[in-house]
Image (tube, rainbow, N blue to C red):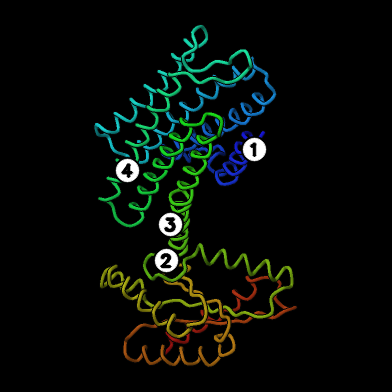
Amino acid sequence: MVYSSFGLLSIIIHIIINIDILRKPAPGAYDPVKSSYRRFLWGVLIYYIVDVLWGSLYAARLVVLTYIDTVMFFLMMVVSLFLWTRFIVAYLNRTGRFSRIILLSGTGILAFEVITLIINLSSPIVFYFDENKDYIPCPARYITLAMQIILFAMISIYTLYVSAKEKGKDQLHYRAMGFSGVCMTIFIILQTLDPFLPFYAVGCLIATCIIHTFVVADEREDSSRELGSFIQMAYKDALTRVKNRTAYLEKKNEIEELIAANEIEQFGVLVMDINDLKKINDTLGHDAGDRYITDASSMICKKFVHSPVYRIGGDEFAVIITGDDYDNRDALLASFEDQIETNLRKGDIVIASGMAVYSRGKDSSYEDVFERADWRMYERKKALKAM
């Protein structure tokens, strides 16, 4: 049972660290490298299960069942190797002679093992059980293990050689692959020396842990970081780099929920509209219009530095007034409007603005506050045109 306990521990750790990869991927999320690695992990898991059963059945001296399980043991050993070679070639993404050698070697060892196990049914060349029900290894077992040692050593040397030409995380990933192969080489040698200790299972466990720690987890972190960047891009206006309408609608819905739950105390809405943008586009061109929009956006951001600014239309902006800006909202708006009137006299950027603040008990939704701000913005626009 001591033999089986190592296998049980391997199964538990294997499932814990690889549960996300072992699961079937979502439709449309196919990745050839991850798919080949998933198959390899499933092969290793089945090998662990067979290995655990072998220890239990052999301890119980159930010769017929132990014989069947031993056949499965050798078969799953080489199947996991076969799947490992597929994963390594997919991960390295190299289509040279060495990759073909790896693939052919994995296939060749699998074919050799199947043939020898068939022959072993009538003429023991891999293993047999003597009259005392003791397990006796035969020459073909050592040949299989020797071929695996050579193949893992070749893969390790090659991946470590490739890593010397890489930099940064790619170098770390290739080295992790190489050292996982070194680990398997060492533990297969130990398995060759002692067939009654689960060295092969221990080697698989350490090798997969190395890959998980230095390759899978690292790439998952990179993917999360890239996803975060994509999400940020999805919420930014491409021209002005302030938050876009999508971000605005999400924030609006969030505030609506807080109002409905009576969990928000104060906020303000500032609605802004750039004057004469169509005129600039028609007379000076859209490039000049874009510069006009970005300059207007910059003016707004510099004035309301503690509040999120959103571009909600071609020439429309909204600011959700919070924090220090909320406490100083009247002074900030007065200063902004003074600057706009100065710009009007100088023929510079003109922005109409209107602000309203949330009144608890009076306003039942965000839209109530927005409509007051929007009305004041249009009143301000009339006043600016009258000037």
In primary-sequence order, the first of circles 2 and 4 is 4
Residue 67 x, y percent position in the rendering: 59, 17
In front: label 2 or label 4? 4
In the rendered image, which quarter is residue 350 located in?
bottom left
In the image, what residue type sits under mark 1?
Ser
Where, quadrant-wise, is the N terminus in this rendering? top right
Disc 3 versus disc 2: distance between alpha carbons? 18 Å
Q: CA distance from mark 1 to mark 2?
A: 58 Å
The one nearer the camera, 216 or 290, is 216
- Please report whichever mark, 4 or 3, sits nearer to the chain's N-terminal start: 4
Q: Residue furthest front?
A: 132
At x 74%, y 72%, the residue is: 262
The residue tagged with tag 3: helix, strand or loop?
A: helix
Nearer the camera: disc 1 or disc 3: 1
Q: Which label was assigned to residue 159?
A: 4
Q: Where does residue 165 sit, x and y in percent of width and height?
A: 25, 50
To which residue does mark 3 refer?
226
Task: Name the residue nearer the viewer: 172 or 356.
Answer: 172
Residue 237's label in the rendered image is 2
Q: Amino acid at mark 3?
A: Glu
Q: Please, is residue 170 above or below residue 10 in the view?
A: below
- Neighbours of disc 2 within 10 Å: few (<14), some (14-19), many (20+): some
For the residues marked 4 and 3, what is the alpha-carbon distance in whole angstroms?
Answer: 27 Å
| Mark 4 or mark 3, whichever is nearer to me | 4
Q: How far is mark 2 from mark 4, CA to CA? A: 44 Å
Query: Which residue does the image show at 46% across and 38% down from the upper left?
Result: 187
The residue where tag 1 is placed is: 5
| Badge 4 element | helix
Label 4 Cα crowd, 10 Å radius (few <14 / some 14-19 / many 20+): many
